[in-house]
């Protein structure tokens, strides 16, 4: 796989060594078991896969390259490059200006931007409407497009579905930049409907099975702007295919797809599967799946607590937190600075959407800690968290010794 040139400040020699040891021992990535880091009074168990994915590294490399090659130009980003506060702040500190926030609220007027400027499309991609606006301004979007290739693959598949008269059911958050972009591209060739979870999928299934689908759709989804223009439930839910916002839970997407397959099979008993349902398993992002599968293996380890590191706006990180919270006390933090002491931590509560002070490390030794991070979180931040926790235990083993133990264990 291609290696990207990203700033050293985002890398961690400790994390890189661990990942390289695991990769060398299992290059086909069939082993998702966690890595034990035994420091004595503290035992960390790190997920097999975590941190920057292909799409994120590609976006960061491209953005820094654009800045280096265009020192005298005004450079803009449609919105946040990725959902990580450190990376976004670094870009702003270097002079990149954001046009809007993640909800589409403007920071700057489009009238300020001219053909002499550079506008970078972030990893989430952009809607067709935004792409056309940029082209009308004479801005070559292909040159400055950092859309994740796996997001692009979802768009391509969605277009193909539309051209073959399937309605695209998008598993995603309706206000997320990536879902907005996927919805726009899917609706270009056909029709699309967004469902956020299995609960909404069940409601849409009721619509499909209803004797009056149009009335049923209005009842369940009339308050949401979740369907393409001209969508008519009685007409456009006879053939469907499911794609996802790549940062959603892959297991939930698979479950939703299978659910709709069975729903359609129950209604159209006289037709073959391909006549009413399109197989879209090939659109699932491998990085999201790997991170989530790794977490499932990680959660098999008995531990005192879990730390999940990442941006609070990050959908894929939030899903990791959800999975951890089902099993054990979980602390969702964006940086090591949130750890305020051995007994206290400022964690993000995903339900209230606020940071809250919570008790932290238990008064026992050894303490067992599960640790992972989102796909937009630098490894350097994960190491900082690890080192901050270790600082509260004076008798820990040296990092080099622990890495040597990892190598001996993995290669044994």
Image (cartoon, helix red, strand yellow):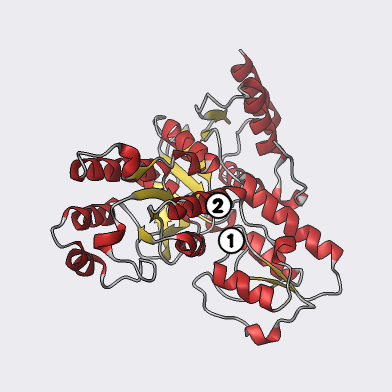
> Could you tell me which quadrant the N terminus lies in?
top right
Q: Is residue 35 above or below residue 190?
A: above
Residue 275, label in figure: none
Does the image show residue 332? no
Work out whether 333 lies above or below 1.
below
Q: Who is closer to the viewer here, 155 or 319? A: 155
Image quarter of residue 92: bottom right
Mark 1 lies on a secondary structure that is: loop
Say whether residue 337 is left or right of residue 202.
Answer: right
Q: Read off the residue under disc 2.
A: 151
Determine crowd level at label 1: few under 14, some 14-19, many 20+ residues with C-alpha closer than 10 A: many
- Could you tell which of marks 1 and 2 lies nearer the N-terminus? 1
Closer to us: 372 or 101: 101
Left or right? Give the position of 204 relative to 336.
Answer: left
Q: Position of residue 93 (x, y in %)?
A: 73, 70
> Which residue occupies the foreground of this view, 153 or 344?
153
The spot of residue 129 in percent (x, y) is: 55, 72
Task: Give the residue displayed 48% in from the left and 46% down from the top.
Answer: 307
In the orientation shown, which residue stands out farthest toward the top? 412
- Image quadrant holding the C terminus, namely top right
Please report the residue visible at 32 percent of the width from the left and 43 percent of the height from the top.
Answer: 275
Q: Are marks 1 and 2 in contact (CB under 8 Å)?
A: yes
Q: Position of residue 91 (x, y in %)?
A: 71, 65
Taking the image as shown, residue 86 lies to the left or right of residue 288, namely right
| Looking at the image, residue 264 lies above or below residue 18 | below
Q: Is any part of residue 164 visible from this angle?
A: yes
Question: Up-down: is 404 above or below 160?
Answer: above
Residue 237: give x, y in percent of width and height: 29, 56
Q: Which residue is mark 1?
A: 125
């Amino acid at each position: 796989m291609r290696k990207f040139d990203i700033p050293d400040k985002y890398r961690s020699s400790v994390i890189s060594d661990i990942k390289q040891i695991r990769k060398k021992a299992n290059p086909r990535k069939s082993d998702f078991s966690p890595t034990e880091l035994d420091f004595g009074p503290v035992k960390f168990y790190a997920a097999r896969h975590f941190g920057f994915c292909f799409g994120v590294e590609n976006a960061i490399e491209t953005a820094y390259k654009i800045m280096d090659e265009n020192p005298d130009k005004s450079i803009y980003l449609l919105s946040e490059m990725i959902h990580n506060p450190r990376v976004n702040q670094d870009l702003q500190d270097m002079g990149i200006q954001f046009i809007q926030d993640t909800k589409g609220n403007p920071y700057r007027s489009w009238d300020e931007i001219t053909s002499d400027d550079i506008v970078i499309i972030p990893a989430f991609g952009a809607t067709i409407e935004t792409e056309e606006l940029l082209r009308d301004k004479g801005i070559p979007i292909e040159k400055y497009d950092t859309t994740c290739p796996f997001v692009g693959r979802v768009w391509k598949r969605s277009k193909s579905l539309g051209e073959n008269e399937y309605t695209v059911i998008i598993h995603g958050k309706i206000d997320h930049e990536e879902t907005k972009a996927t919805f726009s591209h899917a609706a270009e060739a056909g029709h699309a409907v967004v469902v956020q979870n299995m609960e909404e999928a069940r409601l849409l299934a009721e619509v499909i099975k209803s004797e009056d689908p149009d009335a049923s759709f209005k009842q369940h989804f009339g308050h949401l702007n979740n369907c393409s223009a001209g969508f008519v439930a009685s007409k456009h839910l006879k053939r469907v295919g499911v794609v996802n916002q790549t940062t959603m839970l892959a297991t939930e997407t698979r479950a939703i797809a299978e659910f709709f397959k069975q729903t359609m099979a129950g209604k159209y008993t006289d037709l073959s599967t391909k006549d009413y349902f399109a197989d879209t398993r090939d659109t699932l992002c491998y990085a999201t799946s790997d991170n989530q599968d790794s977490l499932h293996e990680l959660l098999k380890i008995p531990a005192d607590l879990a730390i999940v590191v990442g941006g609070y706006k990050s959908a894929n990180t939030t899903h990791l937190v959800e999975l951890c919270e089902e099993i054990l006390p979980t602390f969702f933090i964006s940086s090591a600075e949130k750890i305020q002491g051995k007994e206290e931590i400022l964690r993000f509560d995903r339900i209230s959407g606020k940071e809250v002070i919570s008790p932290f490390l238990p008064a026992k030794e050894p303490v067992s800690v599960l640790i992972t991070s989102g796909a937009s979180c630098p490894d350097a931040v994960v190491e900082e968290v690890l080192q901050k926790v270790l600082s509260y235990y004076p008798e820990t083993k040296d990092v080099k010794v622990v890495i040597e133990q990892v190598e001996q264990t993995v290669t044994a």
